Image (tube, coloured by chain):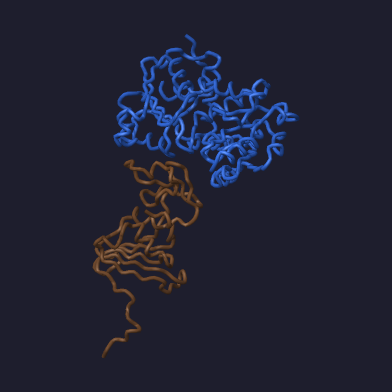
Amino acid sequence: MKPDASHGLLISPIRDGTVIDHITAGEALNVLKILGITGSTTERLSIATNVASKKIGRKDVVKIENRELLKEEVDCIALIAPNARINIIRDYKVVRKKGVEIPLMLRGVVRCPNPGCITNTSEPIESKFKVLGNGLRCHYCDWVIRDHITDHII
Amino acid sequence: MQQGGGGSKTDFDLKHIISIRDFERRDVDHLLDRAGEIDKGLYEKNSLEGRILALLFFEPSTRTRMSFETAMARLGGKTISVDCVEASSIVKGETLADTIRVVSGYADAIVLRHPKEGAARLASEFATVPVINAGDGAGQHPSQTLLDLYTIRQSMDLDRIDVGLLGDLRYGRTAHSLAYALSFYDATLHTIAPGGLELPANLVRELREMGTEVIEYQDIMDMIRDLDVLYVTRIQRERFPDSASYYSAALSYRITPEHLDGTRSSLILLHPLPRAGEIDPGVDSLPCARYFEQSRNGVPVRMAILQELME
C-alpha cells in the first residue's frame, strides 16, 4: 500500500547533527546567517518555516547534519529567536537539549551602522556589541541599534 | 619639591582614558581634586622624569596637543610625535592597530586623536601602554570634558546645575562627552542647535533613561535666563550646504553682550575653542566669560591624568 503523502514528515530526521527548534517564525534564514551557514558552505540543511507550534503558534525549524553547534555559537541567535531550543542529535537520538541565552557581548555578528566607526575600516578587528536590555551598543563607537537588528547582520 | 596631598585617591583603576562612559563619578571627582592640587603647586615637579609620551594626532589640534605637551614638560617628562601624517607609514596603508603596536614600543603612554569613532578604544586593545583619547571623530573627548567640569567647579558646585548646550550638538564630541558626564551630577540640560545639528536622538534617549532632564529650545532667549552654565560649541561651515545657510545659522546662534542681560549672576560662559564667531568678542571682557580660563585649565587637568596613568 502506498503511504499517505498528506501525513508524511515535513522534513526527515537526521542521524547526527543539530536541530534548532522553536525559532521565531520567519527568522530561520537569519538564524543561518548569524551562524555563518550560507549557500556556499558544505552542511546539508533542512529548513521548515511557518510550521504549526503549540507553544508559539508558528515556528521555524532548522536541521543541520553532521555539525554539533557550540553553545557560544547558538547563543548569538537568542536576539532574534529567544525561544529557540537546540537539540544535539547522535545516531537519531537527542543526546542534549538546551535553550539559548542572550550573551553579554556579540562578536562578529552585527556590522556597525555608523559609517564613521573604526570597525568599518580595514583594521584587523571584528565588530563587538554590548547587549543592552533594549538594543545593542557598539563597543567601539557607542552607536546604539534598537530596531531591525537583522538588517545589520554581517 | 612639593608633594601632592592625599586628595581623594582611593582606587582609581582606569588603565586608559577612552570614554567618559568608562568613568564613575568618583573617578571624575578624584581627577578634578588632583587637578586642583596641581593648580596650587602641590605636585612633584619631576614625577615623570625619564618617561616618554607619544602624541599621535591624525587630525589638527592646537590646544589639546599643546596642553598635553605642556603638562608632560611640567612633570619632567618628554614627548615624541608624528609631525605630519602624510610623511608617516599611514600613507603606506599601515593600520592604526599596527601603528599603535609600534609606538607602544617607543613610549610609556600614547595620546591619540583620530577621525574615526572608536579609534581610541581599538588602540587600547593593541597598546601595551596607557592610551588617552584626545578626540575620536564625533565620538568622545574625555580630557576636554574633565577640564570643562573642572572649570565649572571653580565657580560652583557641580550638583544639580542648569547647563545650556548651544551649537553643533550632533557632531560636536565635546558636547556629547560633557552631557554624559553631567548626568553623574543630576544636571538639567537645555539644548539649542541649528536644524539637523541637534543632540543625537540616541544620546538624548540614553540621558533621559539615566534620569537627566533634557529640554530642547528653538530660541536662545527662552533658555539663557535659566542657566548656570552656557556651553557654546563651534558651528562648522562644512555641515551646511552653502555659505548663505551657514552664515544665517551662525548669526542666529551668536552670543552677544545683549543676550546676557538679565541672566543669573552665577552664569558662566564656556567654549572649547576655537570659536568661529559663535561668541562676540564684546563678551570676552565680561566676568561670565571663562573660555580662556577653561583653555588654561587643560594643563592641570592633563597633568592629573598623566600622573594617574604614568606614575
Residue reaching furthest to the right: B262
B114, B142: nearer the viewer: B114
Find residue B263 and report its image quarter.
Answer: top right
* Residue plotted at (52% across, 14% down): B42
Q: Place residue B91 in its image quadrant.
A: top left
Q: Which chain is blue?
A: B
Could you say where residue A37 lies in the image, as x and y percent from the top left? Answer: 30, 60
Q: Whole-percent x and y of residue B118?
A: 42, 39
Residue pushed farthest top? Answer: B1
Q: Residue furthest bottom?
A: A1
Query: Which chain did the image draw in brown?
Result: A
How far from the left and from the top, in percent, is residue B276?
57, 30
- Percent x, y for residue B152? 61, 27
Relative vertical location of residue A45 with respect to residue A128 in this rendering, above or below: below
Q: Residue A132 or A95: which is nearer the viewer?
A: A132
Side of B166 relative to B146 (left or right) = right
Residue, x 71% and y 35% (percent of image)? Answer: B226
Q: How many marks?
A: 0
Q: Is residue B244 above or below residue A153?
A: above
Q: Residue at x 54, y 18 (%)?
A: B37
Q: Is residue A57 left or right of residue B188?
A: left
